[in-house]
Amino acid sequence: MSRFYITTPIYYVNDAPHVGHAYCTVNADAMARWHRQVGDETLFLTGTDEHGQKVAEAAERNGVSPQAWTDQTSARFRASWDDLNISYDDFIRTTEPRHYETVQKFLTAIYDNGYIYKDYYRGLYCVSCEDYFTEEALTDGNCPVHGRPVVEMEEENWFFRLSAFQDRLLEWYGENPKATTPDTKRNEAVAFIKGGLRDISITRSSLSWGVPVPWDEKHVFYVWYDALVNYLTAIGYGRDEAMTAKWWPNVHHLIGKEIIRFHCVWWPAMCMAAGIEPPSHVQVHGWLLVGGQKLSKTMAGEGSVKLTDIAPQSLTSEFGVDPIRYYLLRDTPLGTDGDFSIEGITARYNTDLANNLGNLVARVATVVGSKCGGLSTAPASDSPLAAEAASAVEVARSAWQNFAPHTALEATWRLIGATNAHLEQNAPWKMEPGSDVDAVMGDALEALRIITALIVPAMPATAQEIWRRIGQSGEVATLNFDEVTRWGQLAAGIPITKGEPLFPRIRTEA
RNA sequence: GGCGGCGUAGCUCAGGUGGUCAGAGCACACGGCUCAUAAUCGUGUUGUCGAGGGUUCGAGUCCCUCCGCCGCUACCA
């Protein structure tokens, strides 16, 4: 047995939970569920990032304290994840005492190792924004937000000596080419490092909503520097050495491509500076890009809808939780950008869920009812479906192991297709009740039993419902993947339940 | 500007090291079946593999040029 530690980014509380967050979180959840199925001791971490100037400002605008504000907004993420059936083991908030303690210990270790020094940050500052801008970011030499002149300012900051890690990072990526996947994203990070690393300021003295710098009370850590450390907070860094040693550095950070630099450059360097191993793996995913007609009609008065405008719950309430989970996992391979559209969801729903899987469950139950007295029959050990099932199981296993949910599901649906074909070839509905029908339906039921185990990571609730209908006891998700997917275990004589259609077909207007 | 990627059937895309590599799914057409959510099964059509040139006995697959699209090129979610 091994361990599996997977994380999502912690989401910024000022954002409303949207489909982009859901995409990442559902993928992490499916991965965590699969690893639990194979018996890995699993830790699945998500949470919210609650510091920084924008949060402080939003709280003030709303007339509440920053803590009260983040309490409200963090809860929206929990509600979204509960709705999507996300099985996180820990939900971290960066305003928790445990996080303050770990951040301070971690950054003090870097400080003690000599990689943090005091200097002045110089830049063009907009007084209205209370923010710095680069030359290129200006509009006609003025602040792009307020259109007012910027002033050259300098601020005393603490800096992290990122430049000291350029060679070590390159060496590390040379030895660990799979530390960031897919390769194209790793190449991006490496190219960035090769371009030369500059030191970066990691504290602010202009605001107080952050983790205090232990050796300089006038400063708080810049939000990214506190945020990245959450991955260590959850495993007790600085507080529980045994727990930290147990989970680190074998972690899988699932992130979006927009934050590669922080996770694939800064974060490994920070770990090196603190004297611990860098995270073993960062899996980068692409973005979903909004397309389609309906979305634009319903959600945007004029023009384009952004993915960040779409609340996950607006989708689950219309299509159901498992269909949305399935769509997010199946439609877009992890690592590339994908299209997001209502038409796409509907197509997946009708084709894969209603026609293939749902209909299979229904027709099997009906024929068992009419030809086998409603009771299960035993599968044949030499059924052609046994080989199909073994193949699907093998492909799925390898795919989940390699962060490719869409491949695992594709293989599962090939088995569903093979099972439908098996029924067509044998046409049990034409046969008289007896051993021939029993053999055909035993094979179909057994294939369905294995299919059910295969869809657990993607559609846990649906899996459990099919499990119940085919007369199996207990929770399918708790059964060992390798054992439960072995052909030939279905017992005869168990009542099979027909039930309502699992996924009623969606009628689309022409 | 520099570095990197992409352009393959109507759509979404597979195609390490050149020789069944011209493919899959969806869509479409025809046929079968009627157990099932008008679902399902079988068969089939579509492509000068972005353009041009080169290397080779042989190139989506290597080289050059061009066209088009995209990403990264540093800090404040």
Image: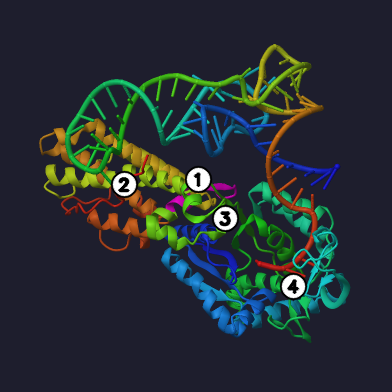
Q: Secondary structure at mark 3?
A: loop
Give the labeled residue for mark 3: A306
Q: Which residue is mark 2?
A: A505
State the image coordinates of residue A499 (x, y, percent, origin top left). Answer: 21, 54
Residue at the extreme bottom of the image, as rendered: A217
The residue indicated by pointer 4 is A274
Give the residue pinned by disc 1: A292
| Chain under callout 4 | A
Q: Is residue B54 left or right of residue B39?
A: right
Label 3, label 4: how far apart the Cα atoms are: 39 Å
Which residue is more in the foreground, A245 or A418?
A418
Image location of residue A411, percent across then percent down: 43, 42
Task: Examine the image and state in which quarter residue A372 appears.
Answer: top left
First in residue order: circle 2 vs circle 3: 3
Q: Are marks 2 and 3 in contact (CB under 8 Å)?
A: no
- Magenta stretch contains residue A334: yes
Q: Are marks 1 and 3 in contact (CB under 8 Å)?
A: no
Estimate how packed mark 3 is, as few (under 14), some (14 to 19) or many (20 or more) residues with alpha carbons within 10 Å: some
Please name the residue shown 37% across and 60% down the image.
Answer: A477
Calculate the distance from the C-alpha at mark 1 to the C-alpha at mark 3.
Answer: 12 Å
Amino acid at the residue labelled 3 = Lys
